Amino acid sequence: MTQALEGKVIIVTGAGRGIGREIALLAAREGAKVVVNDPGVAADGSGADAAPAEQVVEDIRQQGGIAVANFETVAEAVPASRIVKHAVDAFGRLDGVVNNAGILRDAIFHRMSVESFEAVIQVHLMGSFYVSHAAARLFREQESGAFVHFTSTSGLIGNFGQANYAAAKLGIVGLSKSIALDMQRFNVRSNCVSPFAWSRLIGTIPTDSEAEQARVARMQQMGPEKIAPLVAYLLGDAAHDVTGQIFAVRMNEIFLMSQSRPLRSVHRGEGWSAQSIAAHGMPALKPSFYQLDRSADIFSWDAI
């Protein structure tokens, strides 16, 4: 069987644990040379530890693959650019970037600190930009390349206590679509993946109610290894015509997620006033309003 990523060089950020680790391992099994990036921070972004990335590199080498460890943070532009440089210095080129690194600092909105909001935005959204921006110059020159960015149903649909995370993850969707539009002419692709999988970040979700405990228990059954095959596919040449899309993966299910489009319109020839909007415009639109749903409300059935 042909390897999906034979001869390619792939960066995976946040690859020391969880989903990132499984992506790095599978990418190597599929023939890629992998830059395993992870500074080894805690779930909230504190601390540093080289061991997780080094262990993944060792695991890849034991399975016959090729990898190097990188410990730079994605949350600052210059260190993030050094991840890309490391790939080129080690392997001579770069073919794909997986923007997986992330932290969580959940809090109900009125109690969320400015620092917690900014820190999550910096890692998820700015980190995805910094690494992608550095790689884009290489992709432009070689007229090929693939980005896979990680989004979340917290942003796509909604969740309690995650304004920082949701804002970052929905911002990543806009970033990915813009990259896809701007770089299509150079044969560069950009897609998003929204994962359902147990990880240490998911382990920080509060479980104060029976419903939350049941939800987390269901999530624990969803291994991070289930996310990796779609990512490997999106990085490979078989996905040459797949770009600008949003996918979700839950166990053995793959979903193509919707993107914002008009649902319903109202028109008044003489124009609108605040009063006529209240009397006629908004009542006509209300049947198509979205409810205040959370991810669990939309994905209400057990994973397959």
Image: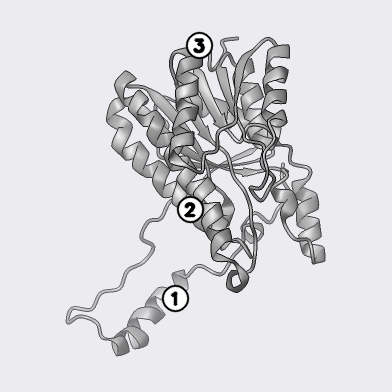
- The residue singled out by tag 1 in the image is 286
Q: Nearer the viewer, mark 1 or mark 2?
A: 2
Which residue is drawn at the image coordinates 72% and 29% (left, top)? 51
- The residue singled out by tag 2 in the image is 170
Please state which amino acid type lies under the numbered disc 2.
Leu
* Crowd class of label 1 (few under 14; some 14 to 19; many from 20; radius 10 Å): few
- Quote the CA–CA distance across marks 1 and 2: 24 Å
- Quote the CA–CA distance across marks 1 and 3: 53 Å
Judge whether 94 appears above or below 43 on screen. above
- Quote the CA–CA distance across marks 3 and 2: 32 Å
Please state which amino acid type lies under the numbered disc 1.
Lys
* Crowd class of label 2 (few under 14; some 14 to 19; many from 20; radius 10 Å): many
Q: Return the x and y of residue 258 as percentages of the image width and height.
A: 47, 50
Which residue is drawn at the image coordinates 67% and 32% (left, top)? 16
Which residue is drawn at the image coordinates 29% and 37% (left, top)? 182
- The residue singled out by tag 3 in the image is 7
Q: Return the x and y of residue 302 as percentages of the image width and height.
A: 73, 49
Q: Return the x and y of residue 225 as percentages of the image width and height.
A: 69, 32
Query: Is 121 left, or right, of 46 in this rendering?
Result: left
| 58 or 251, nearer to the observer | 58
* Quarter holding residue 58: top right
Query: Is 187 left, or right, of 16 in this rendering?
Result: left
Q: Is the Cβ of the residue at disc 1 closer than 8 Å to that at disc 3?
A: no
